[in-house]
Image (tube, grey):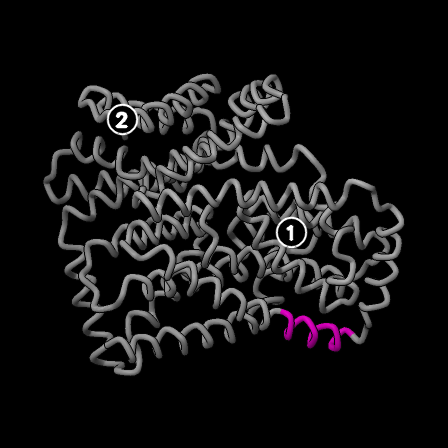
Amino acid sequence: MAWGLRITVVLYALLHFYTYFFPLPFLLQALAITGGGLLVSAFLQSGLRSFKLPLLLFIAAIGVTVFFGDPVGEGMRNGFLLMRDIIGLLIVIPFISIVLREDDYLSAILRSVPGWIDSSRKLYTGIVLFTQVIAHFLLFGVIPMLYEFVNDFLKNERGEAWERFKGTALLRGFGLSTMWVISIPSFIFAVETMGASLWLSMLQGFFLAMVGTVISVLFAGREEKKYGVSLNDGVREELSSVLRQEGEGDRKKAGEFVFLFVSLFGPIFLLHALFHAELMITIPLVIIVWSITYYAVKKKPWKLLQETGRYVMNDTLGKGYQLSVMISVGTLIYSLNQTDFAENAVVLLEVIETQVPVVNFLGLLPFIVILLGFTGLGPLTVMVLVAGILTSIDLPYPPELIVLAVTSGSVISIVLSPLIMPTIVLSGSNGIHSFKNGIVFNWKFSLVFYAVVQVYVQSVRFFVA
């Protein structure tokens, strides 16, 4: 079953990219069959106990199809193809982190900017911002990686005050990245699906992410006073120890990191601007070319082959569950779109807005995302479900505001829900229960952030109406 899963994951990716440029009917049929094979292989590999969510979504999709009398075979075929873009992206994106781990860029950057992190407030701000930058490369894998990095930097500092300092900075930083980081699948899926402007969506998301960063820092200061400890002395003591280890090549490595960042995302923006290239296909293809170029310049072609082999042998097995969720979600969305679900959702929206005039859909949408997050659905799964259904609804709002509303819900879901991967991964790193890492440490931040975003969203809606 392990080999079956490896083969179907690789074959699905290859067929997806080939049929995008050469959509031959028999190859599209082969792609759909491969998607079904991937779902079956992942189920047999994981077992029933670990496969409840994708199985439940798939059964729900088949149930909807049968209930409304639509052809089951056609529904499965189209459902297996509906999420092909996001699946291709998810398969390729890990190659960014493989390149990033080739050298110790993070420590070099830290030692290159000591004046930017010489107090607890500056360090907290730096962690939140740096988490958003590194999320471009690692997605939510940024949390355990940067936790170990920051933990090593603050190796002599222990206690709940320090763990809250580190944990909230990382969790909030990653949450805020989902509002504007182009390689975050949930963000780019929302932009593409809603037909929103990439530049405006990123600009608005970045602006509110920076506002969220300021809110995070203000709350961190209040939390520091609450614990009655001064973190400044500990930060400065640890920083002096790190600076004594400064290497001659640190600035060079920091510059190389900046170049890697620009060389990866610059072509993506350029291709999108010049040729209106679809981001869901442009991003993975640029990542592939960028990775090959990196190892060619480093004169390590053998290392690329080694890492690719390791990824196929090991990492594809871990991808099976996530990809199966996407295939099942695609099948469910397709089946719902064949019914009157979207029209009924519009009617419900109109009833709510009539009964509660101060509430509109842009204010309710974040809560839909948050509630789904508390059922254990991750940000990407929620985004695929919500955005996939929203495409069938004719909403009287600019698509960029819809993207902003739904991604703000994603931020709050990430920092609050104890049942999704970012919080669970953080808890695995710092040993604090996910309920405390999420709800206890972040509920006040979430309320303020929601209010600030809604003030912006409703103000823009008022002026553009």
Residue placed furthest toward the left: 69
Q: Residue 39, position in %: x, y?
A: 36, 29
> Would you say 81 lies left or right of 70 here?
right
Could you say which quadrant of the image residue 198 lies in?
A: bottom left
Considering the whole magenta stretch, tell me its main secondary structure: helix
**Which residue in the protein does label 1 denote?**
427
User: Disc 1 marks which amino acid?
Assistant: Ser
Q: Nearer the viewer, residue 358 or 202?
A: 202
Residue 15 seen in the current view: yes
Q: Which residue is mark 2?
A: 19
**Residue 222 lies in the magenta stretch:** yes
Residue 154: give x, y in percent of width and height.
Answer: 80, 55
Q: Residues within 10 Å of mark 1 (few under 14, many from 20)?
A: many
Query: Exactly how many numbered labels are in the figure?
Result: 2
- Lower sequence index among marks 2 and 1: 2
Identify the element where label 1 is drawn: helix
- Pinpoint residue 428: horizontal percent, then vertical percent: 66, 47
Residue at 37 percent of width and 65 percent of height: 405
| Spatial CA span between label 2 and label 1 | 41 Å
Residue at the spot x=29%, y=80% of the render? 462
Residue at 49% over, 27% down: 316
